[in-house]
Amino acid sequence: MKVTMVMVSSVDGIVSRQSQESVKTWTSIEDQHHLIEIVRKCDAVITGRKSFTKRIAEVPYYVYSRSQKSTDEDKAGGLFFTQKDPTALLEELQNLQFEEVLLLGGPEINSLFLNAKLVDEIIITIEPKLFGNGKHLASSEFELDLKLIDLKKLNKNGTLLVTYAIKKTID
């Protein structure tokens, strides 16, 4: 199973300027279309409660929440609130025969998965904006080596779509 983190960022690495900000207020239409397209092709989405606003495709969503529990209606609609350890959640998804899982979390959820070395690929849209302050891709300190897989210019303004593989090191 492959886990791909998908994010949008300003040139200075900001993924959100303030709590509960919708990135739609500053991302390009090309990025928004890319996100919908990639979510429609995956088997499941993992996100955090703060990042989750609504499902954008009819795939199962696993939402990390410390307090919210899934109702029967949520489950029937493919929405699962979880507190599981990331490794346990991915084992569950693998047992369900999922092959492509997207991580659409915020800094906290991204850090959980990156620190556990559970992410295989990062797809990041870089918007030609500078914000100075805000939240970064992850909220904890770690170091990972990346390998460029693909780079595309999405529009005349200079929005870039960059795909990296995370190099796996042998301990």
Image (spheres, helix red, strand yellow):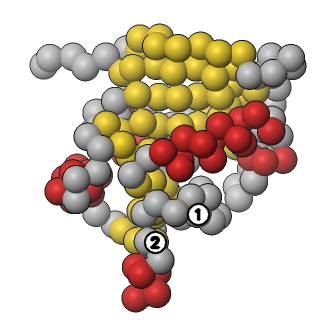
Q: Where on the picture, by quarter, is residue 162? A: top right
Image location (x, y in percent) of residue 11: 73, 21
Query: Which residue shows up at 72% across the image and 42% down it?
Result: 32
Badge 2 density bin: few <14, some 14–19, many ≥20, Cα 10 Å: many
Q: Is residue 67 left or right of residue 31?
A: left
Name the residue tied to disc 1.
55
Residue marked by disc 2? 79
Quadrant location of the C terminus in the rendered image? top left
Q: Nearer the viewer, residue 95 or 165?
A: 95
110 above or below 20? above
Tell me the amino acid under the disc marked 2.
Leu
Q: Total marks drawn?
A: 2
- Identified at 47% across, 28% down, the residue is 122
Is 101 or 48 nearer to us in this picture?
Answer: 101
Residue under the image location 76 percent in, 26 percent down: 127
- Which is nearer the N-term, disc 2 or disc 1? 1
